[in-house]
Image: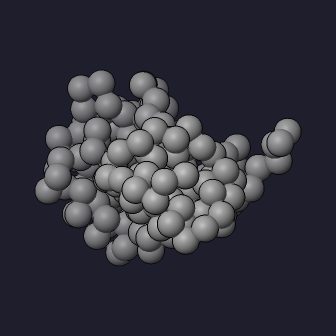
Amino acid sequence: MADWALHSSATGPWDLVFRHCDSRSLAMLAAANRELNSLVHDFERRSYRLEKVLSPYFSETQIPQFRSLQLRTGMLISGSTALQFFLRAPWVGSDLDLYVECQYATDVAHFLLDCGYTHEPYVHQIQNAVQQSIHTPAYCSGRGIRTVFNFKKGGLYIQIIVASTSAIYSILSFHSSKSFISLRGQPILIPIISHR
């Protein structure tokens, strides 16, 4: 292979190859030699950007505010959005699942309302259920998922999944993907047994 081919533009021919590789294949390519290692890591830095999965839901100015809220509340992203992030593939019609501890649910709800989303309660909820139920001391009792609040803006849907203990416990106890994204810059994918 010619040396010039390895040093082609960062978004050049190598991206066409890397885009079709799963994480395992990318790791194997990165281990082949220093040049490929550098190209793979550059590709991963550009591909695994949380902004890509958040941009349908929030504006450029709202994304840093969202990330700050994540830091302050320990809110985690899970579900199809986390899988899209790890697979580097957007899905049409998916929603954003936000797991948060009960004491921070109103903060997250207010942020979504400020971003133009409206609360769409389930039949058993009332319109102002977010404020009423979270201010009730018994609200935080129990294990797993306490409740879910739906928010909508146009064709976009965001769910606040309120954990009665911790967000990570709720994800590991409930969600089938077992993957989530935290603010600390280290998305976490808990291995799923595959047929590979």
Q: Quadrant of residue 164?
A: bottom right
Q: Which quadrant: the C terminus?
A: top right
Residue 106: x percent and y percent?
Answer: 33, 59
Residue lying at 66% horizontally and 66% vertically, measured from the top left: 31
Along the viewing direction, whichever of 57 and 141 lies nearer the viewer: 57
Residue 3: x percent and y percent?
Answer: 46, 59
Residue 56 seen in this snapshot? yes
Q: Is residue 195 left or right of residue 135?
A: right
Residue 48: x percent and y percent?
Answer: 44, 55
Q: Is residue 116 left or right of residue 174?
A: left
Residue 47: x percent and y percent?
Answer: 41, 52
Residue lying at 40% horizontally and 56% vertically, measured from the top left: 4
Residue 82 seen in this snapshot? no
Residue 39, placed above or below residue 55: below
Q: Is residue 172 left or right of residue 71?
A: right
- Figure colour scheme: one colour
Residue 17, placed above or below residue 120: below
Residue lying at 63% horizontally and 46% vertically, measured from the top left: 22
Along the viewing direction, whichever of 93 and 26 lies nearer the viewer: 26
Residue lying at 27% horizontally and 45% vertically, measured from the top left: 55
